[in-house]
């Protein structure tokens, strides 16, 4: 399965593991890269530039395949430049950027042998990323887990629109959990797909508490909600009494000050690390509905390729 994405990022399959705050560390990233896709570690979940350097070295010990470092630059109150510097010094193959203007990161990376991915949720953002020199864009639809675009536009609508508006390759993301989703993304004109939620429900996502993984397995059509809309930063999480409280506070227009304790990294970790089901929140996408098991990453990717082949065979009938 060759596309410009497999060529540019030197991967066997056009599948990318999305940045996952507090979850995407060396074990997961290396497992994904070893399985022929692109694994990533999430820089902003690490305490310091030196912690990032150590995590990069840890991945290098676990795989000799390319991997990426994800920078969610808008969501954390700390400078990211030193961390980008570390990624450049350690010669990581790929840097992805989300949550803010990617200009600064792309300028820092320019001239280095590093490929860049920018996450977008609208046609204009994709065109801007192309103008700034990104190698590819990832378009994230409203089904996705974690932070979303403000427009509520789903993956099936957004992907072809973005594909038609840029000449760099596009990766489809949001709601994709299997080989059918991979083929759907390709049919929409994307040249690869990104998954977040599906990779949480794997054996190598060792930081995710069993309660969190079980909530993904148990998800039905009403299992997720979008919170933080009132802050202009909509994000999809598993619905629980904590997110009910957040929505109630948002309804009362309490603003950031009134919400900060509820949407903090601490509240996030209460749920995803400690399994405190009603004392915090966990990002989950609507795709959880299609997740029924906790395979290894290798089993997941192998199965996706079989499913993709099955779709292809049906198409050729
Ligand atoms: C738990 C969680 C944490 C996330 N953290 C980040 C992050 O730090 N950086 C980022 O670029 N995207 C982040 N995302 C978004 C994912 O990388 C990806 O775009 C999204 O999960 C795709 O939708 P899906 O969950 O339906 O696969 C996160 C998503 C989840 C579910």
Image (cartoon, rainbow, N blue to C red):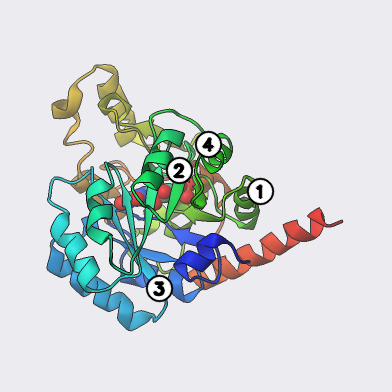
Residue 76 lies, with reference to residue 161, above or below; the image says below
Residue 156 lies, with reference to residue 217, above or below; the image says above
Mark found first going from the N terminus, 1 or 3: 3
Q: Which residue is mark 3?
A: 66
Look at 39% across and 35% down and name the residue there: 149
Where is residue 212 drawn, in percent x and y?
38, 52
Q: Nearer the viewer, residue 12 or 278?
A: 12
Q: Quadrant of residue 69?
A: bottom left
Q: Which residue is mark 2?
A: 140
Where is residue 211 drawn, in percent x and y?
38, 53
Look at 54% across and 41% down and name the residue there: 159
Where is residue 92 drawn, in percent x and y?
30, 70
Q: Quadrant of residue 83?
A: bottom left
3D distance between C-alphas at marks 1 and 2: 16 Å
On whether ligand 1 comes within 8 Å of the CB at mark 1, the answer is no
Is 203 positioned to the left or the right of 305 in the image?
Answer: left
3D distance between C-alphas at marks 1 and 4: 13 Å
Mark found first going from the N terminus, 4 or 3: 3
Q: Which residue is mark 4?
A: 158
Q: Secondary structure at mark 3?
A: loop
Q: Secondary structure at mark 1?
A: helix
3D distance between C-alphas at marks 1 and 3: 26 Å
- Labels 1 and 3 touching (C-beta < 8 A): no
Q: Quadrant of the C terminus?
A: bottom right
Q: Nearer the viewer, residue 269 or 274?
A: 269
Disc marking residue 187 = 1
Can residue 264 be seen in this snapshot? yes
Mark found first going from the N terminus, 1 or 2: 2
Q: Nearer the viewer, residue 206 or 65?
A: 65
Where is residue 120 drawn, in percent x and y?
40, 42
3D distance between C-alphas at marks 2 and 3: 23 Å
3D distance between C-alphas at marks 4 and 3: 28 Å
């Amino acid at each position: 399965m060759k596309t410009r994405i497999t060529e540019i990022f030197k991967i066997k399959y056009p599948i990318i593991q999305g940045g996952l705050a507090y979850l995407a560390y060396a074990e997961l990233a290396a497992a994904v890269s070893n399985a022929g896709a692109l694994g990533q570690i999430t820089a902003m979940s690490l305490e310091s530039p030196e912690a990032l350097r150590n995590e990069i070295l840890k991945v290098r010990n676990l795989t000799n395949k390319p991997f990426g470092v994800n920078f969610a630059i808008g969501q954390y109150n700390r400078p990211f430049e030193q961390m980008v510097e570390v990624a450049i010094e350690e010669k990581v193959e790929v840097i992805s950027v989300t949550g803010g203007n990617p200009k600064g990161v792309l300028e820092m990376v320019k001239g280095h042998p590093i490929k860049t991915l920018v996450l977008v949720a609208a046609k204009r953002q994709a065109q801007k990323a192309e103008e700034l020199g990104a190698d590819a864009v990832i378009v994230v639809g409203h089904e996705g887990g974690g932070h979303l675009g403000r427009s509520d536009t789903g993956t099936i609508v957004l992907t072809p629109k973005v594909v038609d508006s840029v000449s760099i390759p596009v990766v489809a993301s949001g709601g994709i959990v299997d080989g059918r989703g991979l083929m759907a993304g390709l049919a929409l004109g994307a040249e690869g797909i990104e998954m977040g939620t599906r990779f949480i429900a794997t054996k190598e996502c060792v930081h995710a508490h069993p309660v969190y993984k079980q909530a993904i397995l148990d998800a039905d059509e009403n299992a997720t909600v979008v919170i933080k809309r009132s802050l202009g930063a909509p994000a999809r999480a598993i619905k629980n009494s904590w997110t009910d409280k957040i929505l109630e506070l948002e309804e009362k227009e309490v603003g950031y000050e009134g919400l900060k304790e509820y949407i903090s990294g601490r509240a996030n970790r209460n749920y995803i690390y400690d399994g405190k089901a009603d004392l915090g929140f966990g990002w989950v996408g609507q795709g959880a509905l299609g997740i029924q098991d906790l395979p290894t990453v290798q089993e997941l990717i192998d199965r996706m390729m079989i499913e993709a082949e099955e779709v292809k065979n049906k198409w050729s009938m």
